[in-house]
Image (cartoon, helix red, strand yellow):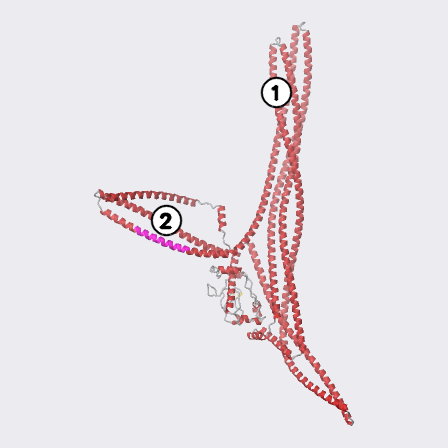
Amino acid sequence: MSLFSGKNLLGTPHRVSNGSNKNKLEFTPIGVSKSRNNGNIGGYDMSPPRSKSRSTYAARQPLNEHKINQSFNESSFDNTLDNFNTTIHSFSKPPISSKNTASSIPPKLYPERNHLLSNGMNSIKEQQSENHKLETENYNLKIKLATLTRFFDQTPEEQRELVTQNIDLKQQLMESARDIKQLKETITDLQYSSNKENAGFSAQSIEEVRSEYKQLLSDREAKLSEYERQIMSMQDEMASKSSNSHVSDELLDKLEYLQSDNQSLRRQIDSLKITISQLEHDNDAVGNNFDDIHEQLDNKNVQIRDLQTDLSNWKDKYEYLNSEYKGSTHSNNDNISQSKQEIMHLNSKIKDLEYKYMNAKNMLEQKDDDLNKMMSSVHDDKTIVDKLDRKVDSLTRELKEKDKEEYNLRSQIKALLDQRTSNKDNDYKFYESEIESLKLKETRVSEQNNKLRIEISELQDQLYQINTNSNSHDQRLKKLQEQKNELQDKLTYYENEYEILEKAFNNAELECDSLKSQQLKADEKIINLENENQLLSKQLKSNSSKSNNSALLELENFNRKQLETERRQLIEEVDSLKFDLKRVTNELEFTKNNKPVDFNNQYLDSEYQKLLMEKNKLQFTADDNEIKFRELDSKCRKLQTIIDDKESIIEDLEARVREVDRNNKLKFLVEDDEKTELLKAKSNNESKMRLLQLENENLQKEFETQINFYKNKLEILLQRQEEDIYNNNNHNKRNYENQSSSIVLLLEKQLEDSQALRNEISQKLSEQIATSDDFKWKYEKLQKDNEQLVELSNALDKNEKYVKLENSQLEMRMKTLTQELNNTTRHCSKLANKVKELKQREMINDKYKSDNNEWNKSHLTSKCRDLQVHNSYLQDKLDNINSRFASTHISSPSDNKKVKLLENELHYYKAKLYDINLRSNDLGVMYQFVMNAIKNSNRLIKNDIIKLTQCGIYPDYASMSLQKLQKGNKLSFKALSKFVLAMVRIRRRSEKAEQRKIRLFELKNEIETDKITLLV
């Protein structure tokens, strides 16, 4: 009976008055109440079994959607929180396994064991304990089913599919167990039929003995007939001899001897006839019994044929299951071989990747060394270029200084020419000396200019070589950087593949080892079972041969006692067959009292049951292996999806890198084209510079030749002039002035031409400097682009590292999820203790809160009463004072003082009343707050218990609070404004309370002084 209703618990045995159905259990689905006179409810036959045939012993019906959907209609799960501990403790207990095999085998197969259930031989305590165990099991199963259905409704689709698959597998297990039970029944029937066949064999042997006896009797009769014939012949001889008067003594002795032999033979014949008549009578009875047995055997043969057909069907099913099992093992072996091949392939891949990795590493090291060398050479070239730039700057400064000096000299020459025109006669010699000095200076300046030009040309040649070298170095650097980036990309890709392959290899090795161990265990169990089957078959053969030999020996001994025992055995076997057919309790008692126990059959049955249990265990292990294999497949698929996602990400990154490489290559090509154009322009400019320099040198040479020619002419003219000074002074002076003026004009023209050439050369130099500056700017720009490319490559490396980190994080998440699943499974085992502790705490908290509430209520009520009494006392005082004040007339200063004192006292008591009212209001607010907190805590605890019963998992409030803190719950403006207003009110109230205290203290002092004055 249930604790909460008068009805029977669901799935427990009904209390039926009939003795034959006392111990029968009937499964009723959860959510369907069982009444006495109910029939079909929801398509299920709920009526107890009535027929006594074999069809009543059907297997339990499997779970289906109807039973699961109706599991919450009238379930007592919500009202059984107090008994939750016992149910959860019973989950951890192993299932109750009865050692008696009669509980698992129908009573019609073993009638001698049915008395344990039907005759009430067991004690009432044992029956009550068994009933109690069955009730607890049924109750626990209900709770399990309810929790599983609720959890099933709350689980995602993947877990639902797993649960449905688990339910289907369990249903298949139940069906296979039912099939095994039916096979057991058929085997026991076959054993009984084999015993009956043995009985038939014994009947055949009796018939053979009867035929042998008949042959013996016929032989004896033949011997008797021969003896009678001999006697007749002897009598004839005696008669013939008697006719003869001479009778010998020997013949007389022979006659006497023959007569005695005849008498003994006749006695034997009489005894044999008596035994034959008895045997014929017995044979008639046995024949009648055999006719009955043959009829029964015909009926049994029909049943045996049906059972044989069933057996053949079951054998087909068993062979089909074996073939499926072998196919599954073969597929597992194929999978293992495939996994081994994949592992070998992965090993080869790993070796190839390692070889490639080492080659790439060596190539990278070589490239790094080359790059370092190139960078060092580039750095040296840069230092040389900087030095040359500094030299060019210094030379340009010197050129500018020389230009300034030349400009000063020209200005001086112009001034001198002006002065010469003004003072031609007086300062002619002085001017000539200055002209010579200026010419000397010009020669020096021209020499210095030539030196500077030579140095500039050398520097330009060096610059050109350095630029060409730097361009070649840049191209080499770019190529090396591109190769380095490609090798780094390949390296990262191979490293990723190597890590993935290592993980897959490790997982495959672990799976292969686990599958190998499981396969070895299964093979060992199969070998053990085959050995045990062979031993049992040998024992069966030996037992059957022994029984046959014993029957033959007993039949050959031909004793009445043995015939009687055989007769009794046949009768007992016939009775056992009748008892199997009728299943009557009286016949069961008769078989119990008369039939001996066959220990060999019991041993064989126990061994067979052990084998079946081991087979079931192997099936369970095979199912577990299949489930694990499916889980591994699902994990592999998930990992493959993750790998595909990562590969897609890597492909996207590779596509981006390729695009960046293409853009960079295009940029490099454009820059190379620009560089080639610039180099062409530079070479053209340099060739032009060289041509100009050559022209300048030619001009300088011509200028020098002209100067030398004019110098020679001047010397000749001066000599002529010195010769002709004394002859023609005036005439010579005029000629000389004209000649000097013409020479000066020629010199000025040559100076202007040289200045124009110099200006052109300076312009070209400035253009060259500008082009070199452009080259420098472009070189710096290219360096910046290279730096940007390096930054891009670093960013890509960072992205790849980030992707690797994400992969590792995902793997860690997978591991953490598996650990969390394991922790949750462990945590579910601890939930029982937690629930118990929660219940105890709840009880303690309820008691403590009830006590606190009662104490608070009593304390508050006492305080309120005291305050009410005090208020009433103060109000009475106020009334008295008011009445006095109304009755008194202001007449004297003493009365005025009294009135003032009374007014002060009135103010003082009013202030005290106000403070008391404020305190009472505060206490009321605190009381309401405490009561609301208690109610909220009770409600929260109940909600937690309901959630726990629904989910089966205790919520982790610490992690939830951490998540809330991490998320950072935002304060609303309303809450913040209320908090600020409350703070302002508390502050104002405290300030007012301090002012009130000061005022009350002053009033108290005034009241005391007034009282003292009145007393005086």
Residue 428 in the magenta stretch? The answer is no
Disc 2 versus disc 1: distance between alpha carbons?
A: 103 Å
Residue 812, visible in the rendered structure: yes
Res 403 label: 1
Q: Nearer the viewer, mark 2 or mark 1?
A: 2
Percent coordinates x, y for residue 577 in the rendering: 60, 74
Q: Secondary structure at mark 1?
A: helix
Left or right placement of residue 403 versus residue 148 in this view: right
Percent coordinates x, y for residue 42 in the rendering: 52, 64
Residue stretch rendered in magenta on the structure? 848-871
Q: Residue furthest top?
A: 727
Which badge, 2 or 1, comes first in the chain's sequence? 1
Q: Is residue 557 above or below residue 690?
A: below
Q: Which residue is mark 2?
A: 922
Q: Residue furthest front?
A: 249
Residue 205 is drawn in which quadrant?
Answer: bottom right
Camera-nearest residue between 770 and 11:
11
- Residue at left 64%, top 45%? 494
Q: Amino acid at mark 1?
A: Asp
Q: Is residue 193 above or below residue 442?
A: below
Residue 853 in the magenta stretch? The answer is yes
- Residue at left 61%, top 46%? 648
Camera-nearest residue between 100 and 773:
100
Camera-nearest residue between 786 and 904:
904
Q: Secondary structure at mark 2?
A: helix
Percent coordinates x, y for residue 183 in the rendering: 61, 67
Helix, strand or loop for the magenta stretch, by majority = helix
Percent coordinates x, y for residue 947 in the rendering: 48, 55
